[in-house]
Image (spheres, rainbow, N blue to C red):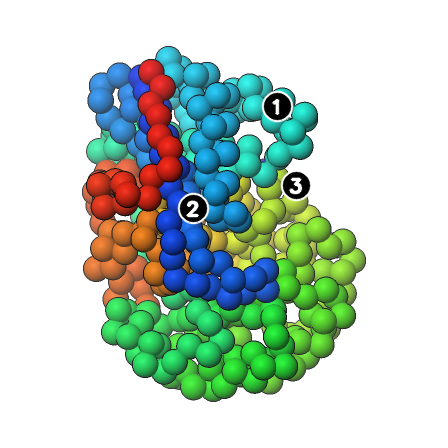
Amino acid sequence: MTTATAVVELPVTTVAAVSLYAFVAPAESIASSFGVRSERGVVLIQIQDSSGSCGWGEVWAGMPASGALHRLNLLREFVAPALVGTTFQEVPPAVAQLRRPLMPVVRLAGEPGPVAQILGGIDTALWDLQARRLGLPLYRVLGGTRARMRCYASGLAPDTSPARLDRLREQGFRAFKFKAGFDDARTIPLLLAQQRGLEPAESIMLDANCGWDLAAAKQAMARLEEGDFAWIEEPLGPECAAAEWQALKAMTRLPVAAGENLAASGEFVEAMSWLDVIQPDVAKWGGVSGVHAVGLHAMALGRQFCPHSFGTHIAAMASAHVLAATGGEGFLELDVNHNPLRSTCTYGGWINNGFLSLPEAPGLGFEVDLRSIETYCRASCTVR
């Protein structure tokens, strides 16, 4: 599987500065299989070139939210000094050279996850920078021609009220993803009722967040067979053996989805033998380069490509551009829970009747303004 390449000639760019921002904010509580989450954390990266152009990327830091400070420290100590002064044209080679200074973190600290998240954020920022320099939307730089895609409202509780669903419909949503994988005796009847209550043209997905072992997953999905669900996401954890995933897939007609917690091309290739829906996350692994490549490979195998995103608008819209560039029929995930670090006004007006349409503005398509969230900034620095 090869990484993404541009279909237009990219400019030769020299990195002049890297600015890093770690945010942690209190947020609306979200109950899931791994507990109740009431904070949001993220690291935002701004990369500036010698001409003054800037690109933005996002590094996932959701569990715990305070992990944003750790990731900023890794970026400041190992990555930013190696990146400043670099002259590059293609993005994947520029990111690949940053793996060497991070290898002590992988080997000695045993932290491949944070390293993958950091490199993913850098990759996205470099693509945004190059697209802005060209004056083109990112999806066109990657070869996309269609900027319209299906989207869904994500992160909904099993007992979400009809009134809230109606408000989401007013915002343009026609597909909804609910939390599952916990308190099955109570929540499965609620989820089946949610499915029955949808309008005929609407779609429903469930996210178990790795909450079941194989026995519990088989039992839960047998009950969920009563409903018409677009997919069941992460019924098992990524640490489960291939044989367990294959056994679960063999006993259900329901589509199975996963990918946000995979962190290598080989893991995605293997998982495509049992997954129907492939969900890499630009802020957790691969950035634009890796996720675009996974998407193309998934579609070549007849899988549905639906990139995962549950952070700020930066990662969400990077995912939208990658989805548009693949030209597939997948869904874009949009978290609709309250998050002080995310600006829904960035894309809220782009949603209509279940579809999001990207603008033709350069790069990710919007300017990033940190003033509204500066009160949640726990640390920041600029390396020149």
Question: Which amino acid, by three-letter code, is at mark 2?
Answer: Gly
Percent coordinates x, y for residue 79 in the rendering = 47, 22
Residue at label 1?
Answer: 103
User: Residue at (36%, 19%) from the top-left corner?
Assistant: 383
> Element at badge 1?
helix
User: Residue at (38%, 57%) from the top-left corner?
Assistant: 27
User: Residue at (47%, 28%) from the top-left corner?
Assistant: 73
- Closer to the chain start, of discs 3 and 1, is 1
Which is in the foreground here, disc 2 or disc 3?
2
Question: Which amino acid, by three-letter code, is at mark 1?
Answer: Met
The reply to whether residue 334 is visible in this rendering is: no
Q: Observer-nearest residue: 180 or 29?
A: 29
The image quarter containing residue 243 is: bottom right
Q: Is residue 127 left or right of residue 230?
A: left
Which is in the foreground here, disc 1 or disc 2?
2
Q: Is residue 235 above or below residue 164?
A: above
**CA separation in Å, label 3 and label 1:** 19 Å
Q: Quadrant of the N terminus?
A: top right
Question: Which amino acid, by three-letter code, is at mark 3?
Answer: Gly
**CA separation in Å, label 1 and label 2:** 24 Å
Residue at label 3?
Answer: 266
Q: Is residue 349 left or right of residue 138?
A: left
> Element at badge 2?
strand
Residue at label 2?
Answer: 41
Which is in the foreground here, disc 3 or disc 1?
1
